[in-house]
Image (cartoon, grey):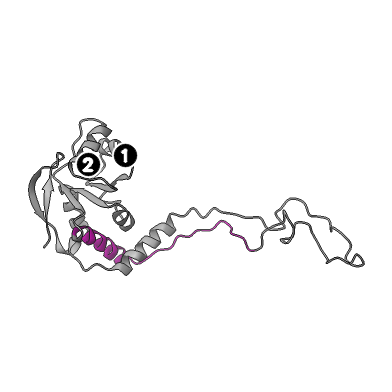
Amino acid sequence: MPKVDVFNMKGQKVGDMDLNDDVFGVEVNEIAMHTAVVNILANARQGNQSTKTKHEVRGGGRKPWRQKGTGRARQGSIRSAQWKGGGVVLGPKPRSYRYSIPKKVKRLALKSALTSKVMTNDIIVLDQIALAAVKTKEMVTMLKSLNVCGTALIVLPGVDDLVAKSARNIENVKTAYVNTINTYDILKYKKFIITRDAVAKVEEVFA
């Protein structure tokens, strides 16, 4: 059972915590993580790119010259694909890139991502994150106290507008809630900062 230190907002160690092996100590499955990340990125695509075919480009209704006798290749419209300003052949049209993967694969990928953070010592557990008001400066001070100098994902047990608004203007820092975390975000951000209460909720949901 992995054990991690618990810190306060000033970066001082205030205790330790045992993590559930079923969530933070599984065998890392890179294939499941790759599958989940590709799925998340595909589902995030807008899919609204569009090109015009020769029938949708304005003009070109008249045959440019007669079929025979000119010595030139036969042409039916100046909006055909071979003409400058013509339509596009088999170009992209609006479509949905969404697809689903099995829930078991999703859960395995998430657990693998969480375990990888424990294995690389990139998980930071806090006793709590409490702010009296929206203060970006206090959030920056907290991150400095925890020696966080790169990207960071802050996971909270529930909605906390004070923390979310205090962190939203900090570059490369994102806040998330237990019910919104995903494999992509966990792997994208170097440091995984989570409160003790959020750890308990994650273990309750995924154990």
Q: Which label is found at residue 194?
A: none
**From the viewer's perspective, is 127 left or right of 107?**
left
| Near-viewer residue (58 or 192) | 192
Image height check: is 95 above or below 132?
below
- Which span of residues is magenta-colored? 90-118
Circle count? 2
Q: Is residue 102 magenta?
A: yes
Q: Is residue 168 left or right of residue 74?
A: left
Q: Nearer the viewer, residue 58 or 188?
A: 188
Residue at the image position 21 percent from the left and 59 percent from the top? 120
Q: Earlier in the sequence, mark 1 or mark 2?
A: 2
Image spot of residue 135 (x, y percent): 26, 31
Q: Which residue lies under the disc numbered 2?
A: 143
Query: Circle 1 is placed at which residue position?
Result: 170
Mark 1: give few (<14), some (14-19) or many (20+) Cα within 10 Å: some
Question: Image quadrant of residue 127?
Answer: top left
Q: Quadrant of the N terminus?
A: bottom left
